[in-house]
Structures are given as structure tokens and as C-alpha cells.
């Protein structure tokens, strides 16, 4: 085990800002990408579902007419 | 309104198994099945890699603990380069065989590639301050990574600027391939530019024989980055498939399922 | 040649997509020599899109175009060489005079047409008095005439594809153009055109193709 | 094919001649940028001569960038481009003709005027010659690569800036070899290798760019 | 009148948002051009920090020049400009609205991204702040002056380069005060006078340019 | 007001030069309320030039334009506010949808028109199905319709000046536009237009003004 305490761990031998700055930004960006990509997927599925719904309504209307 | 002739041309029922999965319709469920295993592998490798990197690998003699940035910096730099090559490969395949799936693959990869390029730049800059005393120098490797980032941005900006997906695909492919031809030229020219008349004012102060635990951590993180990239790209390619193929039968069935599911 | 019996241009099950909408599907069209085809249809029914597919400027979603009995893509040079397309846009350079414009477009098409022929075409279409004015100073109808003068000078192309050729033309110019079209048909050429104006063109074989019937 | 090439070049030169001011303004731009620079960074002669080659190359590059987006624009707007795509003649040859005329109008004048700017920046005769030589071999590559960007962004509204984003990364090697030659010469290393590399880039560009540009034009019109 | 101004600004911003990538590419262009200079003049940190302000200002100026010619172009091509001239509303206000939207899209992002480039050029925090401040006050003048040039060259084919020729001389004072501020500060002279002069230029430009530009537009359409 | 008897628009001895040629000279034209004026003439006879002078986009060589009995230059705001001009070019932004286009052009003209009115105009002219498509994807005729929808939503202007409004329109759209023009006249508005197509517009007072007769 490298670290004597949590404080030592966070300090990173005086390089905390640089090390944690790197890891935090990476984590943030990766998380952001995951959120964005999940949203895109959901929007795409919703769009496809909407298409089907519109088509169904359209067909019903035409059926009535 | 039946488009059976359409789907028939798109999904070759016999022939190469490789080409079988080259149609969005067949690839979509396959990608779905691959997804969870990929995520699990990615998470597992990340945990293993971070544990090795922070708790097993020793403090470096010359750089202290700042070197621990290596565990994301190097995987990110590697991924950014590899993804560009893969992207250009898919683009070439798309232009030659006219398979839409390959274009989708390449546009699904681009944002992730740009992300890794940016992370490599960011972590490199943060690493540079303690080791070189500055966030940025015009070193060959740094410069070419920056240009690579611009190449990604150009590809994405071009695709975003074209409404028609078919046109966007092919125009993007062209610039990706021309860029790929240029990447090695850029790399060597920059390297030469920097070292020719100046003498390296900076060099990477890495110990020649890296502690094997460091190497292990780095490799684990690199594999994790691979798995993550594959996972994200799969999700994105699935989204792109739905967006682009909204008029086809298979997406309609999908939409049917979703609409039905949300009602139930 | 055994192909001489094949129609000049033919489409099989042509489908066209624009954005997310399908404009038409399963379109079969056959154009023989000496035939006049009027592509009709409401605004936005896909006439321009169809014409651009027929001349190879855009790709259909599915289906194929055949030229003299063979897939048009496989005889591309023959196809391009046998066809003359004039679209909404005139292809007229603002900075060139009418004559220079005709020269330039002939050069691009890979033709070499004598000055006398071009001058005669310009005179026929009523631009004789405007020969030394750059096209930027011409009126809307005069620019269109410059583009159409190419048709009057053309004897090479077997098929003319004209997208709204009568736009902006006055009555006299319409008559001149209609006569030129009739002459082309009499020479054995074929002609596909669109228009919203009722214009009478002299032709032995004609068909009207209403895109509204193919809408989906 | 050669006659096609020649007639396309002549057509574009004639067009430019009709607009006249075009020929002069590309030059004017180059002159102005290089003159602005001393204003921006201050007038110390040694420093100026140190950055001279770099500034001239960057200015040449920007002069290309500024104008190349118009290469196919007017042909597209008035429908001539459609006719080019439909021609029986090979499109890459037409494109090459257009690029050639473009270079004669925007690249060559820079090479001719460069000695004057060398004077402003305190360069010796030899040094000026070197910069001119690199510009002579390098600017055609800029035009060729720029044509690819121009055809890719044709009809897209973001034109001006988008083309910069696409093309500038590709310009990097040309810029480095071009501007680096003078430094190499000053360091006593000779400029053969730089010129050879520039020529190599030019050859590759000559082989690849007309084709790529023609393909891009077909895509843009689809 | 204010509501007219606001609706013109909103319209142009919406148009830009539709093209989306435009906004980012202006940024990308600025980043790219400033990155080109080190490639051209060599990577020595002290030299770079010496020319930093000049390079950033020249880049800002070029970013404006490159795009400002399109300010009225699309409105002219599709006939919207005719409608603007025929409006009962005052034309200078419409022009001012367009310039304002234009600056928000091309000038402001440069100010925002400038610190990053300061980093690349080895500037200290104070120095970066000074460059940002001068850019903030100076770039609106660039946009306003550019608009005059754009309306003067509207419809002339040589547009892009001609506009540079017309406008660059007007840009020179802005460039000198803008880029000079950092040097003055380094020489211990303070930057108030530079900022004051830049502000004065901005005020004059605000008063004169919309009117001049409106007049030029009327002439161009005759 | 005493001016109400004065004609809406009037020209006195108008002369127009283009380049070195004089297009027409000594042109006197009077347009009263409710009047339909068809400006006829061959291509290049100066119809567009005349219309641009009438709405103040260009200056005549000599002569003057009067608005409600006063020199138009001296009542410029009134003149501009009372007039609606539609030229060859549509004034339609490629990146906007039809509705956004109408909003933008109303804003520029200094008007504020309710959404419902604009939507109704778009529906009337047959663009209901194309509301969410940016204008760049519209066909030639559909774009023209977007521009013309402004007319359908307009109730403010006393005078419409339309340069070839029927270009590119299909039969149905021509009918809709002709009806809108007739309604405008019935409201007491005046209308000056050019066209090469024979279109029947319902009007009580009409005059045809043949520019060929003024050519010099
Ligand atoms: C913004 C700054 C930086 C950028 C853009 C950058 C970029 C890169 C790139 C592209 C690579 C992969 C190159 C290859 O595998 O050949 C790489 C690898 C590497 N970088 Fe960086 N770097 C930066 C700063 C740093 C700093 C400051 C250090 C340490 C002092 C560093 C240490 C390393 C190491 C050890 C490798 C692995 C080398 C190898 O596998 O051969 N980098 N970097
Ligand atoms: N990207 C797109 N998204 C949605 N619809 C589109 C898109 N591109 C084109 N369209 C539609 O496709 C049709 C294009 O038709 P086209 O231009 O071929 O019509 P046309 O028959 O020539 O009409 P016109 O008589 O007006 O010239 C229009 O209805 C247009 O709205
Ligand atoms: N700079 C110029 N030099 C010479 N002639 C010019 C110049 N500018 C315009 N013209 C001529 O002036 C006339 C312009 O007429 P205008 O555009 O008003 O015609 P129009 O009646 O609208 O025709 P159309 O029916 O074709 O639209 C044309 O005959 C044109 O050739
Ligand atoms: Mg059409
Ligand atoms: Mg006219």
C-alpha cells in the first residue's frame, strides 16, 4: 500500500492539482459523453415511435373517410 | 405501401456472413447483444487499472506522484490515434463497397476519438506543468496531437453542416481519408521541424525501464479505454441507425414495439 | 446494331427519397426516339428530382436508369454524350457576353461549335441586339435565352432534358423555342420537359407523365 | 484532353480578367498582411528578419484560404457546375484546369511580389531567393489542397470558416517545409531536402487532389 | 426601434444557430491561425511570447475579414436586402442589429478563447488579461468597419479580396492600439491610454458605420 | 383629406437608362385605388426596371414618381409603408422554415402579424404539409409560394408591386394567387404586375401598359 492516509492520497505528493485535475476532467467528459449518447438513443427511439403513431392515426383517418 | 424490393436489396439473404452483418437491420440486434458484456468488461478493467495505478505501482523516483497521469494520458493518446485510423478505414470501406453501415460506424467513432484527443491534450498539459514547467510547448508530439484534434473537429463540423445524410457520409469520408494520408506526413514534418534547428529543448523524462507494475496499470487502462470506446460507439451507431433508417420496415417494427411498450 | 430497337432511355422501378419523405416509387418510364415526354405534376411532386436522376446528377434510392437498353452507369460516357440537360439555373456567366457564354459551355461539354452556328442561334432567339452586353446586364428573360441558344445550336444530342424551359420567356421566345423543340423531334431526337404553362409543341409521338399519380 | 485543360484555363483567366480587380486584390491582401505584421509585433529589424519567412508563408496561406472558397462557388450558383458534371470530358481535368488558372491568379503573383516584402523584412538577396523558391514550389500545393476543401464545403453556408478548419491541418507540412527552409539555410544545412520534400508534397497533391475534388463535387451536387 | 433591433439580432442569431457549426468554426479558425504562427516562425517560447499579442490581433482581424464579406451576401442573393431597403424602419438600425449579431458570433468567442491561446504562447495571467481586454473593446470596431467594407463591395465579384484592400487600412489604428497595449504594459507604461483610444475608435465607429453602411447598401442596389 | 382624390401612384415623364441604352422615355402612368395594372412587354423591354423605379429601389434618369399626389421622395415613409414589392428574387432564407421566413420578413418590414394569420396564409397557399422543412429543401415552386404567402397575410399595403409572381407556380397555386389579387383589389388596393403567362384576374378597373410602345 502506497498511501499512509487519505490526506496523503489526495495530496499526491504535492501534485494533487495536476493528477486530480486530469482524472476529474476525464471522468466528467466521459460521463457527459455517456449522458449525451444515451439521450440521443432515447430521442431516436422516441422519434421512431412517433412516426409509427402518426402513421397509425393517419391510417385510421383514411379508414374513416 | 410495401417496400419489399427495397429491403430485399439491402439484406442479402445468402452469401458472406461478413456481409450479412453489414446491413443495419441485422447489425442492430447484434450490437444490442454485445453492449452489456462490453460495459462490464470496461468497468472491470477500469477498476483493476486504477487500483494497480494508484495502490500497487510505486512512486516514481524522478517525477514523484505526478507520473500517475500516465494511466489516462497514454491510453487516451493511443486511442485518439487508433480511432482515427479505424474511422478512415471504415470510410474507405464505405466508399469502395457502398455499405452504409461503415459510414455510420465512422461517424459514431468520431466524437469519441475527438474526446480522447482532447483528454490527451488536457492531461498532457497538466502533466507538463510539473515536469517541464509549462503547460504547453511546441513539441512535435504535442503539435501533431493538436492537429489530430483539429482533424476530428473538421470531420464532425463538415458532417454537421450537411443535411442530407448520404452526402454528409461521403463528404466526411473523403476528408477523413485525405486526413489519414496526411497524418503520417504531418507527424514527420512536425517532428523534423522541431528537432532540426533547435535541439530538443524538452524531452520526455521517462525512466528507460518502467516499473512493471506501472506498465501493467497502463495496459489495463488502455484495454479499459478500448472497451469503453467500443461500448459508446455501439450505442451511438444504434442511435444513428434508427435516425437514418426511420422510413424502413425494421425501424417501423422497432417503433411499433416501443410505442406498444410505452402504452402497455 | 441489335440495340437499335431498345428505347433511348428507360427507368425501372425508380424510387426517390428527399429528406425523410419518399417522393415517388416504382416509376417506370420509357422514352423512344422522336418522342415528346411532358412530366407534369404539382409543385413539389418531384419533377426536378426525377429529371436530375434521369441525367445522372443524383442517385435514385433504388431502381435503375437504362440508356439504349443498357444500365446507364455502365455506359456512362455514351449516356452523358447523348444527352443535354438544362435546369432551373441557366449556367450563364454574368461576366461573359452571350457569345462567350456559348463558347464556354460548348468547351465544357467537350464540343467545338463554329462561331457562325452560335451567332445564328443567338440571332434566332432574338439576342442579336445584345451581343456585346455582359450577361449581368441582361434581363431575366434574356439570360434564359442565352441558355436556350445552346439548344438551337445543338445537333449532337439524342435526348434533351429541360426543366421549365419556358420560365421568364415572352411569347415570341416561347414560340421560337417550341419550334426548335419540334425540329429536334423531327430529327429523331427525344425530349423530356416540365412546365406549368400550357405550350403547344408539334410532335408525332407524345406522352404526358403525371407525377401526382406516383406520389406516396 | 489537353485542349480541354487549356480551354478551361483560358476561360477562367478570361473571367478573372473581366473582373480585373481580382488579380490585383489577392496581391494586395498579401502585401497588406505582411505589412501589418511589423505594426503588430513592433519594428526591431533582427526580430523581423527572424520571423520573415514564417510571416510570408502564413500570409500566402491565408491569402489562399481567403479566396479559395470562391473557386467553385460562382460555377455552382449559376449552374455551370451541373454542366461540368454532365460533360463527357473527365471532371478531374476540368478541376485541374480551374486550379491551374486559380494558381496563376493568386499564387504566382505572390511569388513575384515576395522580393519586395523580403526588402521590408530586412532579408538578404540569397535569403529572398530561398523564400521565393519555396513559395514557387509550395503555393501550387496550397491551391490544390484548397480546391478539395472548396469542393467539400460547396453550398454549405458555413463556407469560409469551415473550409479553414478542414484545410489548415492539411497545410501544416507545406508550411513547415516552406518556412523551415530559410532557417535550415541559416543553420548551414542547405535547402535541398526542404525543396525535395515540398516537391514530393506537390506531386502527391497533383495526383490526389483533382480526383478527390472531383469526387467531392459529385457528392455535393447529389 | 429597439424592438426592431432586437428582432433583427434574434433573426440573425437564429439563422446562425440553424447552421450551428458556424459558431464553432469561427473559434476553430482563430485557434488554427494562432497555432499556425508557431509552426511558421519556430517554437522558441520567449520569441513566441514576444509576438503573441501581435499574432492574436492579426488573427482576430483576419477572422473578421474572412467572414465579414458574407454579412450581407446571403440577404442580397435571396432578395431580403431589397425588402430591408423598402422597409419603413430605419435601415441603419437594421444594419446595426446585423453587425451586433455578427460580433456576438465571431468577435465574442475570440475574446473567450483568447486565454487558451495565451497559454500556448507562454503569456502570464496578467498579460493574458490585457490581451483579452483589448480584444473585447477592439473587435466590435472591427465588425463595424468590416460592415462598411462589406456593403461597399456587395455584388462586386472580387468581393473577398477587395474588401480586405478597403478595410485593412481602417483597421490599422485598431491593430496598433490593440497590439501595442501589451508592449506598453511590459515597458511599464500602463494601458489606460491604449484602452481609451480603442474606446474612442469604437464610439466613432458606432456613430458613423451603421449610417455609412446603410448608404452604401442603397447605392449598391440601385 | 383633400388628397383622397389624388391617384395612389403617378409617374411624370419617367425616363430610364440602362448602360448606354435608353429603355423608355416620357412615361406617364397613373394608378388609382382598386386598379389592376398589367405591365406588358417583350423580354428586356424594361418591366423590371420600371417596377424598381416605382418602388424606389432605383432612381429614374429623369421624371418623377408621385405618391398620393405628392413627390414620392418627400413622403418617403408613407410611400414605403403603403407598398409591398415582390421581385424576381424571393427573399426567402434557405435555413428558415416557411413560418420563420414569414416572421422574419414581417419583422423587417416593421410589422407584427399574428401566428394564426401567417399559418392560415401558408395553409391557403398549399404549404401546410411542408411547415417543418427548411426552405432549402423546398422545390422551386414551393419557395415562390413562401414568398407569396406574405401577400395573403397582408392587409396593410395599399399597393402591391409584383414582378412575375406566377413564375414556377402550378395551376392550383396560380388560381389561389389570382384570387388573392382579386381580393386585394376588392378591398380597394391597387396592383401593378408583370407576367408573360396569360392569367385571368378578376378586376373592375384594369389597364394594360405595353412597354414595347415606349421603347426608344
Ligand atoms: C499537451 C501535452 C501532451 C500531449 C499532446 C501529448 C501527446 C502524446 C501522444 C500523442 C502520445 C502517444 C505517442 C506515441 O505513443 O508515440 C503520448 C505518449 C506519452 N506521453 Fe504525452 N503528451 C503531452 C504531454 C506529456 C508530458 C508532459 C509527459 C511526461 C512528462 C508525457 C509523457 C508521455 C509518455 C510517457 C507517453 C508514452 C510514450 C510511449 O508510449 O512511447 N506526455 N503523449
Ligand atoms: N431534405 C428534405 N426534406 C424534406 N423534404 C424535401 C427535402 N428535400 C426535398 N424535399 C421535398 O421534395 C420535393 C422536391 O421536389 P422537386 O424539386 O423535384 O419538385 P418539382 O416537382 O420540381 O416542383 P416545382 O414544380 O415546384 O419545381 C419537395 O416537395 C420538397 O419539399
Ligand atoms: N449595363 C447595361 N448595358 C446595356 N444594357 C443594359 C444594361 N443594364 C440593363 N440593360 C438592358 O436593359 C434591359 C433591362 O430590362 P429589364 O430587366 O427591366 O427587362 P424586363 O422587361 O424585366 O425583361 P424580362 O421580361 O426578361 O424580365 C435589358 O434589355 C438589358 O439588356
Ligand atoms: Mg422543379
Ligand atoms: Mg423582368
Image: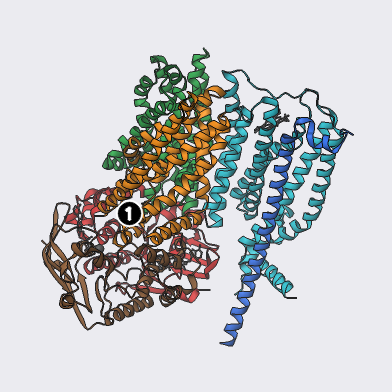
Chain colours: A blue, B cyan, C red, D green, E orange, F brown
State the residue position of label 1: E92
Asked if disc 1 is less than 8 Å from ligand 3, the answer is no
Residue E94: x, y in percent? 36, 56
Residue drawn at x 50%, y 51% is D219
**Chain under label 1?**
E
Above or below, D15 relative to D31: below
Q: Nearer the viewer, residue D184 or D101?
A: D184
Residue that protrudes farthest toward the bottom in the picture: A64
The answer to whether residue A45 is left or right of residue C194 is right
Residue B57: x, y in percent? 85, 32
Q: Nearer the viewer, residue F88 or B60?
A: B60
Above or below, F158 relative to B55: below
Q: Nearer the viewer, residue E55 or F163?
A: E55
The answer to whether residue C73 is left or right of residue C38 is right
Tell me which image quadrant ligand 5 sits in.
Answer: bottom left
The number of discs equals 1
| Residue D33 in which image quadrant | top left
Residue drawn at x 82%, y 44% is B45
Amino acid at each position: 500500500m502506497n498511501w499512509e492516509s487519505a490526506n496523503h492520497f489526495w495530496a499526491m505528493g504535492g501534485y494533487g492539482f495536476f493528477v486530480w485535475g486530469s482524472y476529474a476532467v476525464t471522468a466528467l467528459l466521459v460521463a457527459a459523453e455517456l449522458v449525451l449518447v444515451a439521450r440521443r438513443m432515447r430521442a431516436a427511439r422516441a422519434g421512431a415511435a412517433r412516426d409509427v403513431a402518426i402513421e397509425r392515426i393517419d391510417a385510421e383517418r383514411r379508414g374513416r373517410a | 405501401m410495401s417496400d419489399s424490393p427495397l429491403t430485399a436489396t439491402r439484406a442479402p439473404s445468402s452469401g458472406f456472413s461478413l456481409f450479412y452483418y453489414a446491413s443495419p437491420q441485422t447489425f442492430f440486434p447484434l450490437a444490442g447483444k454485445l453492449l452489456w458484456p462490453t460495459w462490464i468488461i470496461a468497468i472491470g478493467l477500469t477498476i483493476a487499472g486504477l487500483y494497480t495505478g494508484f495502490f500497487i505501482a510505486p512512486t516514481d523516483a524522478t517525477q514523484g506522484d505526478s507520473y500517475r497521469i500516465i494511466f489516462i494520458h497514454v491510453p487516451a493518446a493511443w486511442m485518439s490515434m487508433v480511432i482515427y485510423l479505424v474511422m478512415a478505414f471504415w470510410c474507405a470501406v464505405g466508399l469502395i463497397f457502398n455499405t452504409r453501415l461503415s459510414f455510420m460506424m465512422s461517424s459514431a467513432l468520431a466524437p469519441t476519438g475527438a474526446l480522447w484527443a482532447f483528454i490527451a491534450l488536457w492531461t498532457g498539459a497538466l502533466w507538463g506543468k510539473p515536469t517541464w514547467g509549462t503547460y504547453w510547448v511546441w513539441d512535435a508530439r504535442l503539435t501533431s496531437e493538436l492537429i489530430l484534434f483539429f482533424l476530428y473537429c473538421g470531420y464532425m463540423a463538415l458532417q454537421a453542416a450537411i443535411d442530407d445524410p448520404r452526402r454528409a457520409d461521403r463528404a466526411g469520408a473523403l476528408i477523413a481519408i485525405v486526413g489519414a494520408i496526411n497524418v503520417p506526413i504531418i507527424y514527420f514534418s512536425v517532428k523534423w521541424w522541431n528537432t532540426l534547428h533547435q535541439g530538443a529543448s524538452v524531452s520526455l523524462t521517462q525512466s528507460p525501464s518502467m516499473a512493471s507494475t506501472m506498465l501493467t496499470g497502463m495496459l489495463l487502462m488502455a484495454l479499459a479505454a478500448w472497451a469503453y470506446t467500443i461500448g459508446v460507439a455501439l450505442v451511438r451507431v444504434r442511435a444513428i441507425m434508427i435516425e437514418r433508417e426511420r422510413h424502413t420496415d425494421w425501424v417501423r417494427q422497432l417503433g411499433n414495439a416501443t410505442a406498444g411498450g410505452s402504452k402497455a | 446494331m441489335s440495340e437499335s430497337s431498345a428505347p433511348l432511355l428507360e427507368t425501372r422501378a425508380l424510387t426517390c427519397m428527399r429528406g425523410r419523405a419518399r417522393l415517388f416509387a416504382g416509376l417506370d418510364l420509357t422514352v423512344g426516339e422522336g418522342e415528346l415526354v411532358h412530366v407534369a405534376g404539382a409543385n413539389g411532386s418531384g419533377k426536378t428530382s426525377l429529371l436530375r436522376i434521369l441525367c445522372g446528377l443524383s442517385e435514385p434510392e433504388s431502381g435503375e436508369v437504362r440508356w439504349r437498353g443498357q444500365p446507364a452507369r455502365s455506359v456512362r460516357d455514351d449516356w452523358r454524350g447523348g444527352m443535354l440537360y438544362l435546369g432551373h439555373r441557366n449556367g450563364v456567366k454574368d461576366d461573359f457576353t452571350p457569345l462567350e457564354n456559348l463558347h464556354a459551355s460548348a468547351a465544357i461539354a467537350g464540343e467545338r461549335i463554329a462561331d457562325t452556328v452560335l451567332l445564328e442561334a443567338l440571332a434566332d432567339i432574338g439576342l442579336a441586339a445584345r451581343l456585346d452586353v455582359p450577361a449581368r446586364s441582361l434581363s431575366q428573360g434574356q439570360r434564359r435565352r442565352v441558355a436556350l441558344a445552346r439548344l438551337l445550336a445543338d445537333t449532337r444530342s439524342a435526348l434533351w432534358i429541360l426543366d421549365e424551359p419556358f420560365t421568364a420567356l415572352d411569347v415570341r421566345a416561347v414560340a421560337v423555342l417550341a419550334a426548335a423543340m419540334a425540329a429536334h423531334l423531327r430529327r429523331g431526337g427525344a425530349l423530356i420537359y416540365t412546365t406549368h404553362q400550357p405550350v403547344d409543341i408539334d410532335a408525332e409521338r407524345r406522352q404526358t407523365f403525371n407525377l401526382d399519380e406516383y406520389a406516396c | 484532353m489537353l485542349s480541354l485543360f487549356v480551354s478551361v484555363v483560358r476561360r477562367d483567366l478570361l473571367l478573372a480578367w473581366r473582373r480585373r480587380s481580382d488579380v490585383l486584390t489577392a496581391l494586395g491582401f498579401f502585401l497588406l498582411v505582411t505589412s501589418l505584421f511589423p505594426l503588430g509585433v513592433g519594428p526591431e529589424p533582427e526580430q523581423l528578419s527572424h520571423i520573415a519567412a514564417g510571416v510570408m508563408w502564413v500570409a500566402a496561406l491565408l491569402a489562399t484560404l481567403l479566396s479559395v472558397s470562391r473557386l467553385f462557388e460562382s460555377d455552382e450558383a449559376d449552374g455551370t457546375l451541373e454542366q461540368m458534371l454532365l460533360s463527357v470530358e473527365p471532371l478531374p481535368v476540368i478541376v485541374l484546369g480551374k486550379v491551374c488558372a486559380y494558381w496563376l491568379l493568386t499564387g504566382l503573383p505572390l511569388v513575384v511580389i515576395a522580393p519586395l516584402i523580403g526588402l521590408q523584412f530586412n532579408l538578404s538577396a540569397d535569403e529572398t531567393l530561398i523564400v521565393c523558391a519555396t513559395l514557387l514550389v509550395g503555393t501550387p500545393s496550397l491551391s490544390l489542397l484548397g480546391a478539395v476543401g472548396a469542393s467539400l464545403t460547396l453550398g454549405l453556408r458555413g463556407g469560409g470558416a469551415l473550409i479553414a478548419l478542414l484545410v489548415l491541418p492539411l497545410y501544416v507540412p507545406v508550411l513547415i517545409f516552406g518556412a523551415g527552409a530559410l532557417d535550415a539555410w541559416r543553420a548551414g544545412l542547405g535547402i535541398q531536402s526542404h525543396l525535395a520534400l515540398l516537391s514530393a508534397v506537390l506531386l502527391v497533391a497533383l495526383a490526389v487532389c483533382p480526383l478527390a475534388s472531383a469526387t467531392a463535387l459529385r457528392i455535393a451536387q447529389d
